[in-house]
Amino acid sequence: MMIGVFDSGFGGLTIMSALLRELPEYDYIYLGDSARAPYGGHSKEMVLQYTREGVQNLFKRGAKIVILACNTASALALKELQKEFNSKDRNILGVVAPIAESVAAGGHERVAIIGTKGTTSSGAYDLEIKKNTEGCLIKNKACPLLVPLIEEGWSHKMETRRVLKSYLREIKNWHPDVLVPACTHYPILQKEMQRIMGRKVEVLDTGTIVAKSLKDYLARHDEYELTRSGKREFLCTDCPEHFKKWGSKFLEEKIDAVEQLI
């Protein structure tokens, strides 16, 4: 029985990469909804519908735990889907709660969050952070152009650096203690974000946070009987060859085969 990872496209592979570093022995199945990516501009109803379909597919394929790597899906669909699907032998987990808990544990006073419009407008991070800490100030900034630029393979182009710098100018002038890149695509720009923000601002490594959180969760829950043969499966909803090419860059290792769901 496998660990499932769901995302709207390639981005969740940055989370899966961290999971493979932290928990390499487990079997994984990844589904990227590349036909309908990105989710950030969709309504809550559409995100819920698309994520439900993805979760159903992963459970049918043998997943016992599904990680909603997509921040938008975690923010807008997680709680509803947990009510629908969770049982004694399967569970859906998100990325917002562990990242928010890490922010709170850091004792930060000024927290900046960047993500898609869906994530930043949901208030999900604000709510989770304030559950665990009092008195911190939070600033959200939507950065809708970053995902399309990254998915086009433009992460190293000057145009993308200029767009990122423009988005972060307002954030930097606000003088945060920590920057939360609340989108699975953003780790591709992690070094550039840190360079722009400077040494005084911590840019969170969200993938590592999620991976360590899952490791702790599995240590406390042995009821899922997950298999440990190192198996990896990759699914997408459109253009498997394109997914394989660019997905390998996000995963930081070669993807040999991708199956397209019909």
Image (cartoon, rainbow, N blue to C red):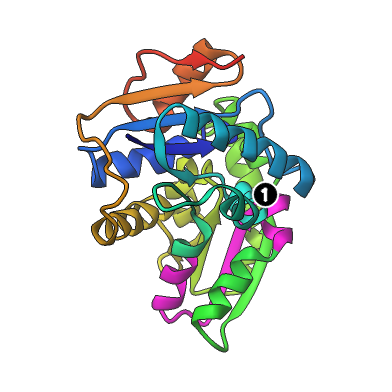
Q: What residue sits 66% from the left and 31% below the top?
A: 37
**Residue 24 highlighted magenta (yes or no):** no
Pinpoint residue 147: horizontal percent, then vertical percent: 62, 38
Q: Quadrant of the N terminus?
A: top left
Task: Please say whether residue 170 is visible from this viewpoint.
Answer: no
Question: Label 1 neighbourhood size at 10 Å, few (<14), some (14-19), many (20+)?
Answer: many
Examine the rendered structure and indicate whether residue 167 appears above or below residue 55. Answer: below
Where does residue 169 sit, x and y in percent of width and height? 64, 60
**194 vs 243: above or below:** below
Which residue in the protein does label 1 denote? 116
Tell me if residue 38 can be seen.
yes
Type of the residue with mark 1: Thr
- Please determine whether, in this image, residue 170 is positioned above or below residue 176: above
The residue segment tinted magenta is 100-122
Residue nearest the observer in this picture, 148 or 239: 239
| Residue at image location 73% in from the left, 51% down from the top | 117
Outermost residue toward the bottom in this view: 135
Q: Residue at x 50, y 45 (%)?
A: 69
